Image (cartoon, rainbow, N blue to C red):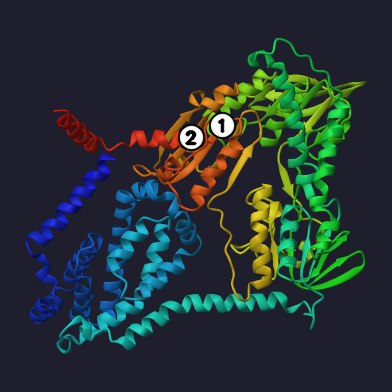
Amino acid sequence: MKQRWLIFILLGLMVGLFFAFDLQHFFSLETLKASHDDLQQAYQAEPFIIIGIYSAVYIVMAALSLPGATVMTLAGGAIFGLWIGVPVVLLSATIGATLAFWVARYVLRNTVQRRFGERLTIINNGLKRDGAFYLFSLRLVPAFPFFLINLLMGLTAIHSATFFWASLFGMLAGTTVYVNAGTQLAAISSIADILSPALIGSFILLAAFPWIARWGIGIVKTRRLYARWPKPARFDRNLVVIGAGAAGLVTSYIAAATRAKVTLIENNRMGGDCLNYGCVPSKALIHTANFIKQAQNSKSLGIADTSIGYDFADVMARVHRVVKTVEPHDSIERYTKLGVDVLQGNARITSPWSVEVNGQTITTRAIVIATGARPAVPKIPGLEAVRYYTSDTIWSLTERPERLIVLGGGPIGCEMAQAFARLGCQVTQVERGDLMMREDADAITLVKAALQADGVRMLTQAEAMRCEVDADTQRLIVRHKNGKEEVLVFDALLCAVGRVPRTEGFGLEELGIQISSRHTVETNAWLQTIYPNIYACGDVAGPYQFTHTAAHQAWYASVNALFGDLKRFKVDYSVIPWTTFTDPEIARVGLSESEANARNIAYEVTRFNLDDLDRAIADEAAHGFVKVLTVPGKDRILGVTIASAHASDLLAEFVLAMKHGLGLNKILGTIHTYPTWSEANKYAAGEWKRAHAPHLILQLIEKYHTKRRG
């Protein structure tokens, strides 16, 4: 940091001396014209020395972003002529620009990225993808300030080599014009004589050419892609949606609501994973498990004695009853009434405009792939020989497993480990890394303590090596970080190591639709695949595997598929909340501390501990915290982590605030009912305000009050 400041001060001193000694007058058009003959004579006498001196001066001026680049370029033509002047000027300008680029990157980039990193993410991603095009286009238009482009590019993530070559070729046209003008120096009375409106327009058109060409190439590629598929003269549907999970249901609902003719195809159960195997059944089980825990802690509520007996089969029957109760919301009958044509069967895309199901071919203007994801099953030798379950099949249990092993330390693994432990199972949780690795250490510590209190044995940094079965005994052998192996005996094993997008069997391979390294369908910012009329959303598209993000993406997929010819919308991932439903719950939106540090984003932390919240004390749940990350010195929210009971509900206020640009001052100025859990948000805002109190003003107010007392 000290070195950066020294360089910054040194550069400032050099620039200051340049202006203090009025050196800029040497780089004026008048001075150049007056000394033209002398410079030409010197060049003819010592050509290599003059070229070297000229290049060195140009490089230093460009590196220090000093004014005079235009006159120096004219001088190149006036002294060296066109054919020597162009390469000398072009190379000198590019080297100087690159030095200025490096200076900005070394001195300023880290500071700018730390302070504005979140806002610069989109720009950095765009430059990473299209940096050469952006820079090349800017360099083609001399109207854009030369020095400003150098400095701004240095603050981005564009590679140095890309900057150098894009600048070199981008400045060729403009440099040639200016150098050629320099060869006619006597005819120039001002810089304006060089750039006529027509010439500027030509440069702008030239700058737009790469983008026009790229757009044209894209059209040609798309037409070639479609060429082998016969396009129907008429279509049966406006939209066909494959998959009736959260993404598919919302997509088809929007299509029907806008009076489009839409078909929804599902090969299994309506409602997808969330209704049948995920969100709904897991929360039903967690509710029962939490009730048992509360009963066990009844003494803290002043109840001397409670005894609870339960039948595991009845608990699981309740889970299925809850699913059945919710089912009508996602049923065929409901969606048929809404105007959706619902078909059950295996869908296969046979062309960009046709889908085959149950031997029937449906032609359609657009297709949305919303096939969801399935549980990942790890490749563990001997796994097929033992009694293992996934998050899809665990709901088939009717007898409580006395000894349960949970593989995986993510949200599903932690939720199920705690729930089954509270139901009386001996639970061992095995995770090759650490638990809930996307969360901050303070939140993870709370969850670990809660799991340990519930009797869960956590084996982190441990890898499942193989399964063995001997008569009625099932064993999992794990290897710890130190290399030692341990034998774990179990009655049931739950694989909760993640989910894999469903991309096989739908015809994607035959169409050449690309699958990413994360096994998701490749889409652009509008959720389009390589075929502009075929979209993907939800778990199969990523990057998040949440029901609410699937529904969020569904709006964009549906609207873009139906109305994309009129207006397209890029998916907005700027504010994505999620919750792990352990006890305490861990709810988060935006940046965590670990993410901010990894991305060099500057932040302040404000924390309110819930042991100070009246309602939490009354509910015997006064543990946890609300943690808010803000821009240094400002109340703009970068991210929030809440670890507590009801954290998922408390988070909503912060999600609203971040989405609509409301800061902590607005939350502090909002009335919250007393006594409620939501007051924690206001108190967190109050902690921020207290830390940013205007001390000077308060001192003046104190003197005012003192004076009034006489």
Question: Which residue shows up at 29% across the image and 69% down it?
Answer: 145
Residue 654, image x, y percentages: 51, 44
Whichever of labels 2 and 1 marks the residue nearer the N terminus, that label is: 2
Snapshot quadrant of residue 338? bottom right
**Is residue 288 shown left or right of residue 217?**
right
Question: Which residue shows up at 36% across the image and 84% down it?
Answer: 201
> Between 575 and 185, which is closer to the camera in this rendering?
575
> Between 403 and 21, which is closer to the camera in this rendering?
403
Residue 433, image x, y percentages: 62, 31
**Is residue 207 shown left or right of residue 303?**
left
Rounded to the nearest whole Å, what is the CA distance between mark 2 and mark 1?
9 Å
SS assignment at label 1: strand
Residue 284, image x, y percentages: 76, 35
Q: Is residue 40 above or below residue 682?
A: below
Q: What crowding class fits label 2: few (fewer than 14 Cα within 10 Å), some (14-19), or many (20 or more)?
A: many
**Is residue 109 shown left or right of residue 181?**
right
> Between 365 and 531, which is closer to the camera in this rendering?
365
The N terminus lies in which quarter of the figure?
Answer: top left
- Which amino acid type is shown beneath numbered disc 2? Lys
Snapshot quadrant of residue 463? top right
Q: Is residue 404 above or below residue 202?
A: above
Question: Which residue shows up at 9% across the image and 76% down it?
Answer: 31
Q: What crowding class fits label 1: few (fewer than 14 Cα within 10 Å), some (14-19), or many (20 or more)?
A: many
> Between 329 and 100, which is closer to the camera in this rendering?
329
Q: Which mark is residue 643?
A: 1
- Which amino acid type is shown beneath numbered disc 1? Ala
Q: Which mark is residue 383?
A: none
What residue is disc 2 on? 627
Question: Which residue shows up at 73% across the image and 25% down it?
Answer: 291
Q: Is the Cβ of the residue at disc 2 closer than 8 Å to that at disc 1?
A: yes
